[in-house]
Amino acid sequence: ETGVTQTPRHLVMGMTNKKSLKCEQHLGHNAMYWYKQSAKKPLELMFVYSLEERVENNSVPSRFSPECPNSSHLFLHLHTLQPEDSALYLCASSQDVTGAYGYTFGSGTRLTVV
Amino acid sequence: QQQVKQSPQSLIVQKGGISIINCAYENTAFDYFPWYQQFPGKGPALLIAIRPDVSEKKEGRFTISFNKSAKQFSLHIMDSQPGDSATYFCAASRNDYKLSFGAGTTVTVRA
């Protein structure tokens, strides 16, 4: 394991459902990120947290709501999603927000919206 | 707009051959250029990274070549092995958290 654990690995949800993605890191990192990965596209940065404070919301629709209760845990709450939101959602962490030592990614949650 | 352009989208190489992936960027403020490797069902993992004060960095069979004037950098995989079959992403940042990723290159190494 990479030190960043994401659950669930797979999620199928209807457009009216509410679900949450969970990310946990045991690396002692201070920054955590949510990325969206769609086929044949660059990874899209969604949210950045530094020491539990949100420092970036990259024009993400409000149907995605992040939560960072402490420096080890990060959630992505989902509600009234659209089929085009189907993608692999990746959580990552880094030592600090400079990212100077690279990111450690989790294995992702494969989300399918039906 | 896409800040890092990566090519090719995919490539096939014979075992023992050389795989070459190219990336180009526009922002001259970028000062950190990592490459990530992603296997199916896994998240990307940092493979190798370079800063613009050097023109080349080598780690085992993986080499980054960096051309600051051309705003280009590339990954060379020497003696490619079937276990190298994966998707490779280049990225760039200006020493902040905003890593800009390329679209990825799927490498297939044929035995």
Image (cartoon, grey):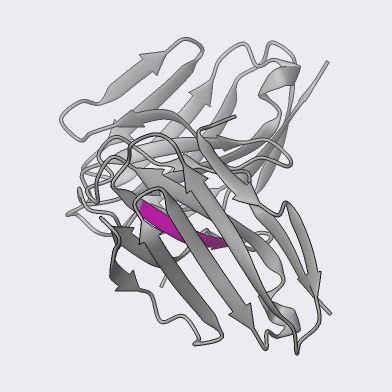
Q: Is residue A53 above or below residue A28?
A: below
Residue B77 lies, in percent from the top left, at: 55, 21
Counting every numbered tag in the picture gives 0
Identify the residue at horizontal 20%, vertical 44% (top origin): B31
Tell me where the magenta segment starts and ends, as one range. Answer: A32-36
**In front: A94, or A19?**
A19
Q: Quadrant of residue B41?
A: top right
Quarter occupied by the C terminus of chain A? bottom right
Q: Can you see residue B6?
A: no
**In front: B94, or B43?**
B43
Q: Is residue B21 left or right of residue A30?
A: right
Quarter occupied by the N terminus of chain A? top right
Q: Can you see residue B87?
A: yes
Q: Is residue A10 left or right of residue B50?
A: right
Identify the residue at horizontal 49%, vertical 37% (top origin): B36
Residue A16 lies, in percent from the top left, at: 75, 90
Q: Is residue A58 above or below residue A16?
A: above
Residue A35 lies, in percent from the top left, at: 50, 60
Q: Is residue B70 left or right of residue A60?
A: left
Residue A29 lies, in percent from the top left, at: 32, 41
Q: Is residue B10 above or below residue B13?
A: below
**In front: A106, or A26?**
A26
| Magenta-span inclusion, residue B36 | no
Identify the residue at horizontal 52%, vertical 43% (top origin): B89
Identify the residue at horizontal 61%, vertical 63% (top origin): A21
Q: Main secondary structure of the magenta part?
A: strand
Q: Is residue A42 above or below residue B109?
A: below
